[in-house]
Amino acid sequence: MTEALSPAAPAASRVLSGVQPSGALHLGNYLGALVKFVALQDRMQCLYCVVDLHAITAWQDPAALAAQTREIAAAYIAAGVDPAKAIIFPQSAVREHAELAWIFNCVARLGWLDRMTQFKEKSGQHKERSSVGLYTYPVLQAADILVYKATHVPVGEDQKQHLELTRDIAQKFNNDFGAPGFFPLTEPVIEGPGARIMSLRDGSAKMSKSDPSDNSRVNLLDSADTIAQKIRKAKTDPEPLPETLDELKLRPEADNLVGVYAALSGISKAQALSQFAGQGFGAFKPALADLTVARVGPIGDEMRRLLGDPAEIDRVLQAGVEKARAVAGPVVAETKRLVGFWTPPTR
Ligand code: AQP
């Protein structure tokens, strides 16, 4: 329960994660992140932020950003995150994230950031025109996590390298400032067939908000008809589904669709294959479309209902800000003391 959440609470059980308000949420975000958010909220203290500071590393329309932030919060709740159990808040409203990120900018090494593959992918051919924020994004992510001394971070596989960097920063800070164990070495929670959902148009590209083709992804706000149509049109090959995972691995689009089926059903890919081996996509795709509509459709409906009452979403976010700051404030104060910053005399 959130009432038990305090800086003194056992760090062995704290979860932090977030999603950027940078576009429409899709099935990859749902299976890679949101499903795990819901599963963890009954077992651990959970903080789920809408990472708007990360979103502005690429241009966001100021007139749309606050609405997009509410939309992500609505997606969390519609997917099953319970604001009475987990803390939901916008990242920029808890200024301790940015404050700790600056200190971590001075701990992280340039060589570490130079190795980050996501920056290379997102900056593409135009590195010199990317924002500095996009480059230091993983340092802010480390601050998001460690400002709560979070020990577990549910994310998709694309975030694995950033979480390794978070551990490196925690370890270097603890060593540099003679504070063993001050920041925990956070564990990623990545496992499962939903950890890397690929584009419906290209089995070698990640399903992504920024893909220019809307047919590459199922959006949580898509209608049932649109979802079914996108699954029907998904790129496949002419062969029936194979018997073994080794054969499936050689067929990226088929592998991806079986992975989606498995993740939505809560079974392994091997179990999904045992249901469909030998059958063609003419049989498999309708089953996948029905399942996707059954799981995603109600989330979209609930999001639309929640977005009809923005004041209620704002109440959830405001309550979340207060609870999150109550944890982050003392952690940043102690961090500043360890660094040697001047602090006001206590009376
Ligand atoms: N395709 C995916 N499969 C599984 N998990 C995914 N995630 C994203 N794409 C997939 C996970 O969703 C969470 C939130 O992601 P994000 O919005 O913060 O950033 P992102 O990873 O950059 O997401 P997108 O959709 O791919 O956005 P763009 O197009 O802007 O890059 C994270 O846990 C992420 O792992």
Image (cartoon, grey):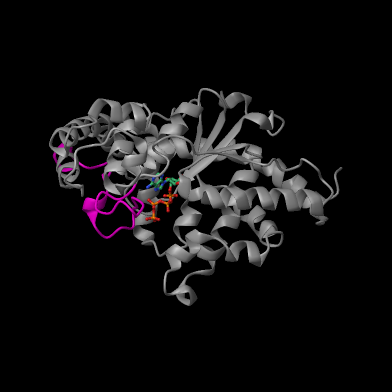
What's the residue at 29%, 30% (across, down)? 273
State whether residue 266 appears in this view.
yes
Relative to 250, 175 lies left or right: right
Q: Position of residue 117 (x, y in %)?
A: 50, 60
Identify which residue, 76 or 266, lies in the foreground: 266
Magenta span includes 267: no
Rendering coords of residue 11 (x, y %): 68, 32
State the image quarter where residue 2 is shown.
top right
Whether residue 74 is visible? no
Give the residues in magenta. 198-226
Q: Position of residue 244 (x, y in %)?
A: 33, 34
- 210 in magenta: yes
Q: Quadrant of the N terminus?
A: top right
Residue 346 occupies which quadrant of the picture?
A: top right
Instruction: From the image, give the main secondary structure of the stretch colored magenta.
Output: loop
Q: Quadrant of the C terminus?
A: top right
- Which residue is at the front of the view, 53 or 150? 150
Looking at the image, which residue is at 47% across and 71% down?
130
Total marks in image = 0
Q: From the top left corner, tell me how far across and down residue 321 is, in percent.
A: 54, 40
